[in-house]
Image (cartoon, rainbow, N blue to C red):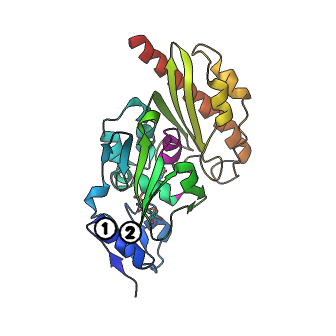
């Protein structure tokens, strides 16, 4: 018999996950469209009554985003400028109705190459907290999402939080999304850039791109090429020539692989220019 459970506590949820196999249900905005009209044949573990999983808190070392935290919660939460890219990505996920129920963790667990939350969290060096009744694991986001619709989560584990080290919550950040239209659209390509600047020199930069490989990825060659450059330097030229071997886009209905490769470089350049401009204004105002 198919079971439905809506536990009120995390302990109860983890006990159930240890007993048998369940499909976790959060906001349902990926779950229900994927299900379509087919009958549900899996046990459903609805986590929407577990209040402790929702919200963003700060501890000594990390910003901790609870697994049920919605995109609207992210938009409304006061956070350092390093989270601006995540807030901008939040505003791009579907529509306000979707943002009100859809969770950040659901976006990661669904592991779509086009998940808008992933690049913005990659540039924050985010890690995923997984709990079972027996243990707790922390995996870097890169180690958590293993492929298209494939994560490192074990069947007895729940993703309980996304953790951002405070050391990575530095600088300012920007998210740029390219779609076939401006709004309510799945990304053809999207980029997030976080930059730390001192005395008009780029001291640290993190760049991630999505929808151009099976899993969104950082671009370490571009990052290395930009560190040490001045904000008034020819940043566009650096990005034009820096290697991006991590990208392996596919042809699909939204765009060809060749178009995606070209577009990727362009949106990275635009995001870098935007974040450089912001960093410059912040320095000038300080
Ligand atoms: C109209 C529409 C527009 C959309 N537009 C966008 C868009 O522009 N950009 C974008 O990135 N996405 C978009 N989405 C997809 C979706 O809204 C997001 O991916 C959302 O963040 C998913 O969160 P959720 O809480 O609804 O997940 P759910 O649908 O509840 O779950 C998604 C998957 O994650 C698993 N899961 C969820 N939470 C956990 C957990 N805590 N632990 C373990 N497993 C878990 C579920 O079992 C399921 O497999 C859109 C969806 C719709 C319907």
Relative horizontal placement of residue 148, taking residue 245 as reference (left or right): left
The quadrant holding residue 159 is bottom left
Name the mark on residue 11: 1
**Label total for image:** 2
Relative horizontal placement of residue 48, taking residue 62 as reference (left or right): left
Q: Which quarter of the image is occupied by the C terminus?
A: top left
* Residue drawn at 31 percent across, 35 percent down: 78
C-alpha separation, residue under disc 1 versus residue under disc 2: 7 Å
* Residue drawn at 55 percent across, 61 percent down: 152
Could you tell me if the residues under marks 1 and 2 are in contact, i.e. CB atoms within 8 Å?
yes
Name the mark on residue 56: none
Q: Which residues are magenta?
A: 111-126
* Image coordinates for residue 221, horizontal then vertical, percent: 68, 33
> In front here: 177 or 45?
45
Pick out the residue farthest to the front.
134
> In front here: 135 or 208?
135
> In front here: 31 or 37?
31
Quarter, ligand 1: bottom left
Classify mark 2 as within 8 Å of ligand 1 or not, answering yes or no: no
Q: Which quarter of the image is occupied by the N terminus?
A: bottom left
* Residue 186, visible in the rendered structure: no
* Residue drawn at 25 percent across, 67 percent down: 8
Identify the element where label 1 is drawn: helix
Residue identified by numbered label 2: 133
* Residue 234, visible in the rendered structure: yes
């Amino acid at each position: 018999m198919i079971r439905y459970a809506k536990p009120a506590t995390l302990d109860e949820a983890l006990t159930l996950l240890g007993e048998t196999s369940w499909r976790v249900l959060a906001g349902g905005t990926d779950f229900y469209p994927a299900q379509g009209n087919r009958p549900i044949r899996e046990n459903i573990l609805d986590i929407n009554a577990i209040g402790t999983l929702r919200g963003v808190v700060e501890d000594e070392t990390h910003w901790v985003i609870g697994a049920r935290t919605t995109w609207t919660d992210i938009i409304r939460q006061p956070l350092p400028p390093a989270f601006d890219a995540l807030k901008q990505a939040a505003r791009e996920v579907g529509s306000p109705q979707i943002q009100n129920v859809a969770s950040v963790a659901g976006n990661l667990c669904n592991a779509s190459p086009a998940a808008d939350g992933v690049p913005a969290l990659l540039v924050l060096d985010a890690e995923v907290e997984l709990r079972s009744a027996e243990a707790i694991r922390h995996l870097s986001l890169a180690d958590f999402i293993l492929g298209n619709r494939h994560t490192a989560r074990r069947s007895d584990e729940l993703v309980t939080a996304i953790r951002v080290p405070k050391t990575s919550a530095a600088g300012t950040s920007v998210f740029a999304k390219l779609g076939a239209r401006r709004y309510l659209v799945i990304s053809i390509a999207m980029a997030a850039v976080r930059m730390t600047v001192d005395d008009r020199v780029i001291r640290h930069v993190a760049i991630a791109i999505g929808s151009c490989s099976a899993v969104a990825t950082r671009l370490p060659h571009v990052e290395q090429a930009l560190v040490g450059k001045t904000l008034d330097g020819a940043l566009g030229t650096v990005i034009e020539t820096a290697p991006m071997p991590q990208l392996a886009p596919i042809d699909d209905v939204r765009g060809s692989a060749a178009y995606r490769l070209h577009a990727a470089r362009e949106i990275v350049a635009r995001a870098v220019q935007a974040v450089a401009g912001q960093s410059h204004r912040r320095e000038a105002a300080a």
